[in-house]
Amino acid sequence: MTPGIALHGARLAARDAAGLTRIRRTLASAQGARVVADDRECVAFASNDYLGLAADARVIAALCDGARAYGAGAGASHVVCGHQSPHAALEARLAAFVQPSPGARCLTMSSGYLANLAILTTLADRETEVHADRLNHACLNDGALLSRARLLRYPHADVDALRARLAASRAKTRLIVTDAVFSMDGDIAPLAALLELAETHDAWLVVDDAHGFGVLGDGRGSLADAGIASERIVYMGTLGKAAGVAGAFVCAHPVVIDAILQTARPYIYTTAAPAALAVALTASVDIIEHDAARRARLFARIAQFRDAAPGLAWPTLPSRTAIQPIVVGESAAAMQLSQRLWNAGILVPAIRPPTVPRHTARLRVSLSAAHTEDDVARLFAALRG
């Protein structure tokens, strides 16, 4: 055994002893409220498929049509020859739908992680301060570090603390960077107050709406939910969660979009996603815009969860979104509870440090429009059992 293998073996053993080993289950079914995972049929409260679109017949048909018309792969990056007409149509559709500012344009990318790296490395440099919420997704922090900016993390959703830091800032460029819906807590950033600070202190406001797009603001996302729009906003939405397919998009002032297209390495040096996905996503956005009943079903399940939660042995966090965390505390206890649910035919993974702070390991219950009232009742019966 080489010293390197021994070193990493010891590190893995230490993670396992601390209850931090990640479990990768294999699904033999489509995403949905019910899945076959590791050869077991179960009710799943683990997916970000909030509207149940991942297995929607219309989206699947569009994907098949797109593959027949445009092939299985794009073949090159967007700036070489991989940008096909379905990509352009989807970008125009998303820009018109989200509209973070008048005349905004859009770029689609292969993942939200790449999109955030592209945004941060375009807007920030060594003379920039990035003011980031402490509970932001890892890719926002990674993007700031890759840009070589000074990364300053303010206490979660603490507008007053951020205001004081911005007032003291002497940086040439300032960015306020935040998740819109926080992926492990389910709460929503104070976006209107953050925009006010951005305007006062001449800063960009970068919003990662991975978990709000398709769900909040009549599907248009967290900006519409907050009633805000501005040329200062650079908006990122993902397309593999509520939209049910894959990829992400950035929507912003045309100058920002052109700057990303011309200079962002995560965009320039990545093969474009297959055009078939763009065809499927255009169908998905049409459903998001016009099928309000899906969101109504989702919010009914959220209300059902919130009504039943006070009877649990563990605290839940205040959330009006599809993300409903049950805070267990220590990693071992969270793993035991997750295993108890698994034994009852219910899939809810345990989320542990470093994804969440120490001593706040939790079950992250993810609700979907595809869940029924009986599904949620079964979850609570198992939790109380």
Image: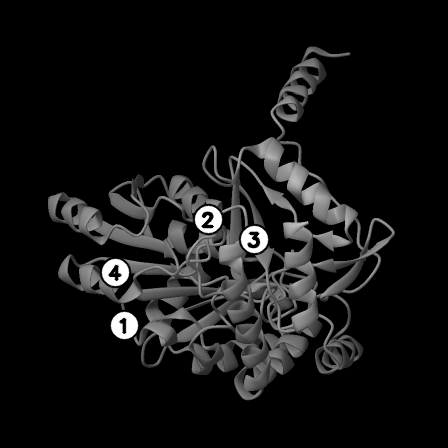
Tell me which residue sits at (69%, 11%) in the image: 3
Q: Quadrant of residue 255?
A: bottom left
Q: Residues within 10 Å of mark 2 (few under 14, many from 20)?
A: many
Q: Amino acid at mark 2?
A: His
Amino acid type indicated by mark 4: Leu
Determine the secondary structure under disc 1.
loop
Do residues under tags 1 and 4 come within 8 Å of each other at their CB atoms? no
Q: Residues within 10 Å of mark 1 (few under 14, many from 20)?
A: some
CA distance separating discs 4 and 3: 32 Å
**Whole-percent x, y for residue 131 in the image:** 28, 47
Quadrant of the rendered image containing residue 241: bottom right
Q: Is residue 303 left or right of residue 231?
A: right
How far apart are the two marked residues, 1 and 4, measured between alpha carbons?
Answer: 12 Å
Q: Residue at x 29, y 54 (%)?
A: 176
Query: Which residue matches tag 4?
Result: 194
Q: Position of residue 207 (x, y in %)?
A: 38, 61
Q: Farthest residue toward the right?
A: 39
- The foreground one among 382 and 45 is 382
> Rounded to the nearest whole Å, what is the CA distance between mark 3 and mark 1?
29 Å
Foreground residue among 257 and 30: 30
Element at badge 3?
A: loop
Whole-percent x, y for residue 31 in the image: 73, 64
Camera-nearest residue between 20 and 381? 381
**What residue sits right under mark 3 in the picture?**
269
Which numbered disc, 1 or 4, marks the residue closer to the eye? 4
Query: Which residue corresponds to mark 1?
Result: 230
Secondary structure state at the residue bearing disc 2:
loop
Q: Considering only order in the chain, which callout, 3 or 4, is on the residue closer to the N terminus?
A: 4
Name which of mark 4 and mark 2 comes first in the sequence. Answer: 2
